[in-house]
Image (tube, rainbow, N blue to C red):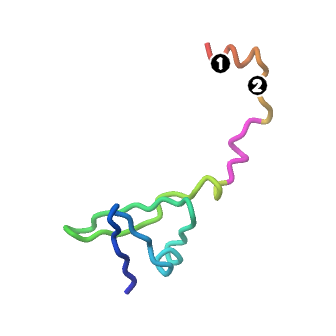
């Protein structure tokens, strides 16, 4: 069973086996969920911005300067 040591600052390094099974990459967030008193489950909470494909969320073109004035007023 994989294990990790808590540092002086309260940090741990998740073992490679755990990171692989959860599919974790640099920049990912993990969530610790208490499943019963004193026992927690770890799950991948979100992917990093690098892994996200946000092209669909971008506008076709940038608004003109007069449009920006209207938006910000």
Judged left or right of residue 59, residue 42 is left
Front-lying residue, 10 or 15: 10
Residue ID at (65%, 56%): 50
Say which mark, if any, is on residue 63: 2
Residue ID at (47%, 64%): 44
Front-lying residue, 63 or 1: 1
Q: Which residue is mark 1?
A: 71
Quadrant occupied by the N terminus: bottom left
Residue 61 is situated, as x and y percent measured from the top left of the image, at: 80, 32
The image quadrant of residue 38 is bottom left
Say which mark, if any, is on residue 43: none
- Magenta stretch? 53-59
Are discs 2 and 1 less than 8 Å apart at CB?
Answer: yes
Residue ID at (25%, 71%): 39
Element carrying mark 2? loop
Distance of label 2 from label 1 (alpha carbons): 10 Å
Whether residue 18 is situated above or below residue 72 in the rendered picture: below
* First in residue order: circle 2 vs circle 1: 2
Residue 47 is situated, as x and y percent measured from the top left of the image, at: 56, 58
The image quadrant of residue 73 is top right
Element carrying mark 1? helix
Residue ID at (43%, 66%): 43
């Amino acid at each position: 069973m994989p294990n990790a040591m808590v540092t002086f600052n309260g940090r741990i390094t998740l073992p490679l086996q755990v990171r692989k099974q959860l599919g974790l990459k640099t920049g990912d967030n993990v969530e610790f969920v208490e499943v019963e008193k004193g026992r927690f489950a770890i799950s991948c909470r979100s992917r990093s911005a690098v892994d996200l494909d946000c092209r669909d969320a971008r506008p076709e073109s940038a608004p003109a300067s007069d449009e920006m004035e209207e938006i910000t007023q």
